[in-house]
Amino acid sequence: MVTATGKNRLTLAGDAKAILRLIQSIPSPKAEPFKQWLAKVGYERMQEIADPSQSIDRARENWQQLGRSEKWIQQRMPGQETRNKLTDYWKQSGVEKADEFAFLTNIIHQEWTGITVKKHKDLKGLKSQNLRDHMSEAELIFTALAELSTRQIAETELAKGIEQNATAGKKGGRIAKNARLQLESKTGKSVVTNENFLPPAKKKKEIK
C-alpha cells in the first residue's frame, strides 16, 4: 500500500469479510465477545430470512437509536421499497452486476440533482456512509420520485439491458428534476443540501 510519504509498503490487510472470518479462528478468550456478536448477528439474519418483516422492524429501531425523527423514518422506509422494486425490475431485464446497478443509479441521481452520487456524498462530508441515510426529507422524496418514475417508464417501454434502462433513468430523473426546480423557484431554497446526520467533529486542543 502507498504510505503518506508516497512509498509502497508491504501491508497485511483484508476486507471486512476476511477479517471477521479471521476473528472466528482466533482461540484467545479476548476474541470471545466478537464471536458472540457474530453469532448474534448471524442468528438475527436467519430470523429475517424466515420473517422479512423483522428486518424492517430492526431498521426502524436502528434509525430511532441514531436519532432520526418518525417523519424522516416514514420517508426513508417507503423510499427503500421504491428502490427495491426498481432493482427487481433491473434484474429481470438483464442487469445483474453491482457496477451496473451503481451506473444506472448514478444516471438517475445526476439527472435529478445535477451532481453525481460521489459529489453529493462529498457535499455532505460522507465517506463510507450510506448517502440515503444522510438525506433530508426532501432529498428522500425526490429520490423516490425519480426512481418510481424510472421504473414505470422502463416497464412501459419494456426496457432491457443497460442502455435502455439508462435511457429510462434519464427520463425518470428528469421528472424529479423538473419538480425540484419548481419547488426551489417557490421556496428559494435548494433541495440538494450539505446537511447530514454525522456526529459533530471534535475540536482539536490548541497546542500552547
Image: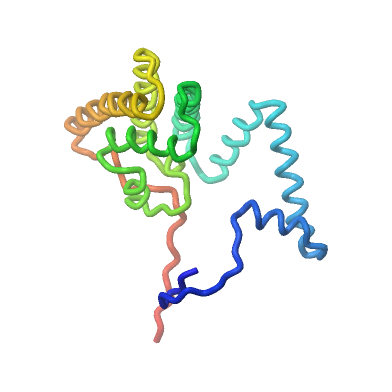
Residue 132 x, y percent position in the rendering: 43, 39
Residue 181 x, y percent position in the rendering: 20, 31
Residue 4 x, y percent position in the rendering: 43, 74
Outermost bottom residue: 208
The structure residue drawn at horizontal position 61% and vertical position 54%, both measured from the top left corner, is: 16
Left or right: 21 with respect to 117?
right
Q: How many marks?
A: 0
Query: Could one spot residue 78 in this view of the protein?
Result: no
The structure residue drawn at horizontal position 18% and vertical position 30%, both measured from the top left corner, is: 186
Left or right: 202 with respect to 191?
right
Against 126, is 157 above or below?
above
Outermost top residue: 156
Q: Nearer the viewer, residue 77 or 178?
A: 178
Against 114, is 195 above or below?
below
Left or right: 18 with respect to 94?
right
Left or right: 114 with respect to 65?
left
The structure residue drawn at horizontal position 50% and vertical position 27%, both measured from the top left corner, is: 84
- Residue 161: quarter of image: top left
Against 82, is 20 above or below?
below
Q: Nearer the viewer, residue 42 or 71?
A: 42
How is the protein colored in the picture?
rainbow
Q: Nearer the viewer, residue 92 or 109?
A: 92
Query: Could one spot residue 9 in this view of the protein?
Result: yes
Residue 135 x, y percent position in the rendering: 39, 40
The structure residue drawn at horizontal position 49% and vertical position 38%, both measured from the top left corner, is: 98
- Residue 106: quarter of image: top left
Q: Quadrant of the C terminus?
A: bottom left
